């Protein structure tokens, strides 16, 4: 990556030396239609159009964010995202896949598992690299009144912090999580530039631990109670090998109900964790915003735990509507095709029901993202409408950011399905 010299100082329009900045959100039009167009084109192109679809969604959502009534501009392209993915696939994913197949062929599946364990540190490091470089790409493609953003630090520094703090997560039973998140946020924020001016980040992890402790202990308590209730019953059922070898209908029914109950219990524990984590995430968002500063001005956020819960529930319902629509379309198309093909050899060989099931499964996976643009817009709207910038910023003194040459975008982030937006 080459870096050009920063542009000379210039004035941003007709503004005073220090001006208050007002953040607002203007709902983008046509997201429902865009969702269906992206879904259909992705399906017809076997996912290839996704790079261009994602770019169009970003352009609309970026322009919905208004600073002093003027929109942000996103100048990234689908071609850049596609090229980034191709490079990472050829340089990272394909060699790893071939190496794993070679290990299986020469040494057997057991050695392949060992090989996979050896690769885990590398993958964690690459996830850190990918997260950082994805943010750099988005910032270089974001501008306001012609002033673009930048990320000027080291991706390897961020990745190293990402990996060694991740190793400590299980060793500390998760208690390092607030400190880890704060440290990573500090690196990312203080490396960010708007024009030639940096952001500063003064947050410490201490204020987050009260809510984190409540979340941790409540989830642990509920988990112990739930699994304590089911643990004895599960042990008694599975400790009798004769009953498992030739179970009666009553045993099969009881075992099935027990497994269903255990699954529901795990879902209940997860829901408790999610509800408690919503309050923690709200506190973290407020804390990070209040400790992020730009040229003497500070951010503030009014998001709440109940607000996050309502947003998550409504977004989930919208996602399920998309899944339902996708399944209905799939079944209609496949059944129609089966009626037209009648007794064709291909349909008879596979079986119409199997064809419907296979196609339904494929569409179920694809349709999970059918309403993604709407869900993303609702999430962004909630965050932006609850975010303020308190104080005045010397807009007239901000110079253009040094140009960061990036011809490809987010290959690692897309390859590992991280930070997907």
Image (cartoon, helix red, strand yellow):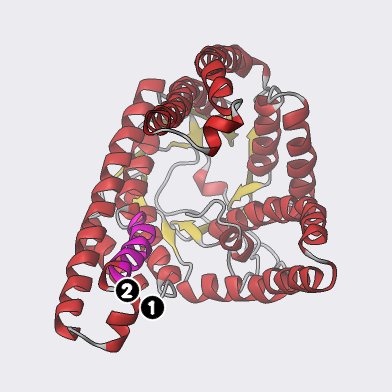
Horizontal side of 336 relative to 276 (left or right) equals left
The picture places residue 130, in percent across and down from the top left corner, at 65, 57
Magenta-highlighted stretch: main secondary structure? helix
Cβ atoms under marks 2 and 1 closer than 8 Å: yes
Q: Quarter of the image containing the N terminus? A: bottom right
Q: Secondary structure at mark 2?
A: helix
* Relative height, residue 358 to residue 346 (above, below): above
* Relative height, residue 355 to residue 123 (above, below): below
Question: What is the count of numbered marks?
Answer: 2
Q: Foreground: 353 or 83?
A: 353
Residue wearing tag 1: 45
* Relative height, residue 134 to residue 245 (above, below): below
Q: Is residue 139 visible?
A: yes
CA separation in Å, label 2 and label 1: 6 Å
Residue 158 located within the stretch drawn in magenta: no
Point out the stretch of residues depicted in magenta: 354-369
Q: Secondary structure at mark 1?
A: loop
Residue wearing tag 2: 41
Horizontal side of 296 relative to 116 (left or right) equals left
Q: Foreground: 291 or 145?
A: 291
Q: In the orientation shown, which residue stands out farthest toward the bottom?
A: 345
Residue ID at (78%, 32%): 168
Badge 1 crowding class, 10 Å Cα cut-off, few under 14, some 14 to 19, many 20 or more, is few
* Relative height, residue 111 to residue 261 (above, below): below
């Amino acid at each position: 990556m080459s870096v050009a010299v920063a542009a000379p100082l210039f004035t941003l329009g007709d503004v005073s030396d220090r001006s208050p900045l007002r953040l607002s959100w203007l709902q983008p039009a046509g997201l429902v239609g865009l969702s269906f167009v992206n879904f259909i084109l992705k399906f017809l192109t076997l996912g290839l159009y996704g790079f261009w679809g994602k770019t169009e969604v970003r352009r609309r959502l970026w322009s919905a964010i208004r600073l002093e009534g003027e929109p942000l501009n996103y100048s990234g392209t689908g071609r850049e995202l596609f090229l980034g993915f191709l490079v990472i696939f050829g340089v990272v994913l394909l060699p790893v896949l071939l190496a794993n197949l070679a290990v299986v062929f020469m040494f057997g599946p057991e050695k392949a598992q060992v090989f996979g364990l050896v690769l885990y540190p590398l993958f964690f490091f690459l996830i850190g690299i990918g997260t950082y470089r994805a943010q750099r790409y988005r910032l270089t493609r974001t501008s306001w009144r012609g002033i673009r953003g930048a990320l000027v630090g080291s991706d390897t520094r961020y990745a190293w912090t990402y990996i060694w703090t991740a190793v400590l997560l299980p060793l500390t039973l998760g208690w390092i999580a607030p400190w880890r998140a704060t440290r990573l946020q500090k690196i990312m924020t203080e490396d960010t530039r708007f024009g030639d001016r940096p952001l500063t980040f003064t947050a410490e992890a201490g204020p987050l631990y009260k809510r984190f402790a409540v979340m941790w202990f409540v989830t642990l308590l509920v988990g112990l109670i739930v699994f304590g209730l089911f643990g004895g019953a599960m042990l008694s059922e599975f400790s009798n090998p004769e009953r498992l070898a030739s179970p009666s209908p009553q045993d099969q029914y009881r075992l099935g109900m027990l497994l269903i109950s255990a699954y529901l219990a795990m879902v209940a524990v997860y829901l408790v964790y999610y509800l408690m984590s919503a309050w923690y995430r709200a506190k973290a968002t407020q804390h990070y915003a209040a400790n992020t500063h730009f040229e003497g001005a500070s951010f503030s956020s009014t998001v709440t735990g109940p607000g996050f819960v309502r947003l998550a529930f409504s977004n989930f319902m919208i996602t399920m509507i998309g899944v339902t629509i996708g399944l209905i379309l799939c079944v209609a198309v496949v059944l129609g095709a089966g009626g037209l093909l009648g007794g064709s050899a291909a349909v008879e060989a596979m079986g119409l029901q199997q064809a419907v099931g296979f196609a339904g499964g494929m569409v179920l996976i694809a349709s999970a993202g059918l309403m993604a643009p709407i869900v993303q817009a609702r999430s962004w709207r909630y965050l932006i409408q609850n975010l303020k910038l308190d104080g005045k910023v010397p807009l007239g003194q901000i110079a253009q950011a040094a140009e960061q040459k990036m011809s490809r975008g987010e290959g690692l982030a897309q390859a590992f399905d991280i930070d997907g937006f």
